[in-house]
């Protein structure tokens, strides 16, 4: 992992206007992502964690310009790509890919594996037709599938094999950055381990950078260089894996991590659980000040009125909390 940012995210914001009521008579805004600022370092695995609906997928989609940002910037090779139209995005799209939880959403059931993996290369004019079969076979080899799989259809494959095909398709244009949005979450545990190892091998072989979105904190701890913690559309904390898991600063991170069982039985017996009281508030009208104040055991008056600044505590360990000194 180098120190150079591959992507620089500045004050990124995504709001979804929605209609409410049986006849859509009123409107409201979902605050899915607000004021996110962080770098994604070339060659790293940066994971995003947080409860369902906190904005992890929205962050990935908005960075890729699959959602049009409401505000802020995504700098790639010195250029702001947030809001570029599809034509302007086309040469950049090759570099920035996504793998979803459900490969059915990217694999057309009527296309063979070979067609699915070959299509992006033809679209971007990266290979000529006579070379296509060989390149597809090479990509299938990269994801641990034999060349004969090129003739198969998605429904003839197991879940793990389908996810390998989705990864081969994402790799087809030699990308630099892949968002893995719950890419292993639907798979059996033994298959999950295989796909994780495959992703790590491919990262090393091709120098890939991952934004890895996952619920399973044990997996996140295993594979991440850095971890970002989100709560209700805002980043609460971001740091190296050891900083976030070893010395978490934000009360929400501490509560989230206290739910993860320790591998060591002695440590597990003495583990202090911190149960979060109350429900996650609605992203339609998030709490004022710090969005976590309605559930935070340390909440003070200032937390209700003032949004805590997003700041580096000095060693690349970022946090947004009034109670953290410095
Ligand atoms: N297209 C959309 N229109 C309206 N609201 C949306 C849309 N997409 C997401 N949202 C809302 O934005 C918020 C963030 O959603 P998002 O899918 O990013 O969360 P997430 O952290 O990925 O959750 P999960 O862990 O369940 O995948 C949620 O309140 C969600 O309902
Ligand atoms: S800013 Fe206040 S409410 Fe928010 S996490 Fe810190 S102490 Fe808790
Ligand atoms: Mg999601």
Image (tube, rainbow, N blue to C red):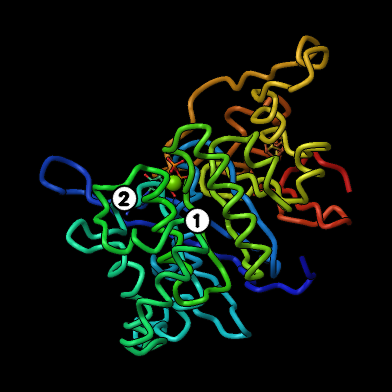
Mark 2: secondary structure? strand
243 to the left or right of 232: right
* Front one among 114 and 272: 114
Residue 274: image tag: none
Q: Quadrant of the N terminus?
A: bottom right
* Front one among 227 and 275: 227
Q: Is residue 202 above or below residue 306?
A: below
Q: Position of residue 286 (x, y in %)?
A: 48, 42
115 to the left or right of 308: left
The residue wearing badge 2 is 28
The answer to which quarter of the image holds residue 10 is: bottom right
Q: Is residue 107 above or below residue 215?
A: below
224 to the left or right of 199: right
Q: Position of residue 277 (x, y in %)?
A: 57, 20
The residue wearing badge 1 is 144
Whether residues under marks 2 and 1 lie with C-beta atoms below 8 angstroms apart, the answer is no
Q: Position of residue 248 (x, y in %)?
A: 78, 37
Q: Is residue 21 above or below residue 259?
A: below
In the image, farthest residue toward the top = 269
- Closer to the camera: disc 2 or disc 1? 1
């Amino acid at each position: 992992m180098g120190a150079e940012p591959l992507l620089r995210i500045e004050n990124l914001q995504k709001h979804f206007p929605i209609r409410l009521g049986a006849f859509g008579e009123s409107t409201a805004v979902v605050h899915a992502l607000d004021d996110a600022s962080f770098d994604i370092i070339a060659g790293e695995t940066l994971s995003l964690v947080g409860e369902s609906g906190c904005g992890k997928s929205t962050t990935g989609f908005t960075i890729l310009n699959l959602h049009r940002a409401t505000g802020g910037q995504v700098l790639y090779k010195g250029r702001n790509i947030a809001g570029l139209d599809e034509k302007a995005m086309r040469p950049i799209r090759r570099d920035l890919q996504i793998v979803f939880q459900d490969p059915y959403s990217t694999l057309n059931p009527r296309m063979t594996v070979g067609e699915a993996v070959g299509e992006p290369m033809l679209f971007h004019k990266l290979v000529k037709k006579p070379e296509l079969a060989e390149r597809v076979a090479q990509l299938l080899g990269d994801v641990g599938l034999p060349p004969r799989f090129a003739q198969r259809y998605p429904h003839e494959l197991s879940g793990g094999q389908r996810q390998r095909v989705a990864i081969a398709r994402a790799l087809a244009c030699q990308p630099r950055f892949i968002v893995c949005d719950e890419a292993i979450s639907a798979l059996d545990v033994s298959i999950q381990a295989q796909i994780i190892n495959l992703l790590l091998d491919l990262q090393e072989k091709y120098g890939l950078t991952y934004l890895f979105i996952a619920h399973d904190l044990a997996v996140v701890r295993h594979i991440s260089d850095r971890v970002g913690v989100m709560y209700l559309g805002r980043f609460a904390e971001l740091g190296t894996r050891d900083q976030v898991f070893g010395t978490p600063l934000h009360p929400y991170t501490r509560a989230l991590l206290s739910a993860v069982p320790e591998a060591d039985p002695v440590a597990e017996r003495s583990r202090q659980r911190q149960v979060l009281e109350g429900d996650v508030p609605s992203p339609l009208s998030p709490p004022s000040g710090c969005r976590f104040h309605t559930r935070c055991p340390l909440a003070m008056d200032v937390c209700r009125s003032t949004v805590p600044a997003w700041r580096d505590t000095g060693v690349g360990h970022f946090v947004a909390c009034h109670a953290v000194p410095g």
